[in-house]
Image: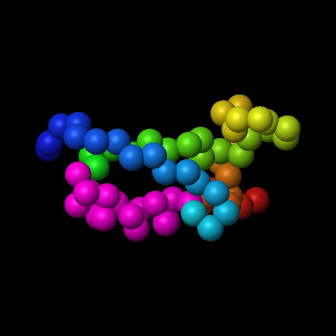
């Protein structure tokens, strides 16, 4: 296992969730990225200005739909 080399930030949103992020991993690895920084992957409470006050997995990003 190699150590830390570089971090790349991915932003989730409509049309870009865990599945799409996973598809980018080989490409990012080839660029030298060793770690990903991901935004919260949970649904934020209504009216959230930043998305970090989460309440449950966001179905639009690959979470469980109820």
Q: Where is residue 51 in the image (x, y as percent from the top left)?
A: 69, 38
Q: In which quarter of the image is residue 12?
A: bottom right
- In this rendering, would 44 be left or right of 23? right
Query: Most prominent secondary structure in the magenta stretch?
Result: helix
- In this rendering, would 24 be left or right of 58? left
Residue 26 visible: yes
Q: How is the image coloured?
A: rainbow
Question: Which residue is drawn at the image coordinates 57% and 63% (left, top)?
Answer: 16
The residue lying furthest to the right in this view is 47
Q: Where is residue 34 in the image (x, y as percent from the top left)?
A: 27, 46
Question: Which residue is drawn at the image coordinates 29% and 64% (left, top)?
Answer: 26
Q: Where is residue 33 in the image (x, y as percent from the top left)?
A: 28, 49
The residue lying furthest to the front in this view is 31
The residue lying furthest to the top in this view is 53
Residue 28 on the magenta span: yes
Q: What stretch is highlighted in magenta?
A: 17-32
Question: Which residue is drawn at the image coordinates 49% and 44% (left, top)?
Answer: 38
Quadrant in which the N terminus is drawn: top left
- In this rendering, would 34 be left or right of 50? left
The image shows residue 28, relative to residue 52, as above or below, that is: below
Q: Position of residue 55 (x, y in %)?
A: 73, 38
Q: How many marks?
A: 0
Quadrant in which the C terminus is drawn: bottom right
Residue 55 visible: no
The image shows residue 2, relative to residue 25, as above or below, that is: above
Question: Which residue is drawn at the image coordinates 79% and 36% (left, top)?
Answer: 48
Residue 15 on the magenta span: no
The residue lying furthest to the left in this view is 1
């Amino acid at each position: 296992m190699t150590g830390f080399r570089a971090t790349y930030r991915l932003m989730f949103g409509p049309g870009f969730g865990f599945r799409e992020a996973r598809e980018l991993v080989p490409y990012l690895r080839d660029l030298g990225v060793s770690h990903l920084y991901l935004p919260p992957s949970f649904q934020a409470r209504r009216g959230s200005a930043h998305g970090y006050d989460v309440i449950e997995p966001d179905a639009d990003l690959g979470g469980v739909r109820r």
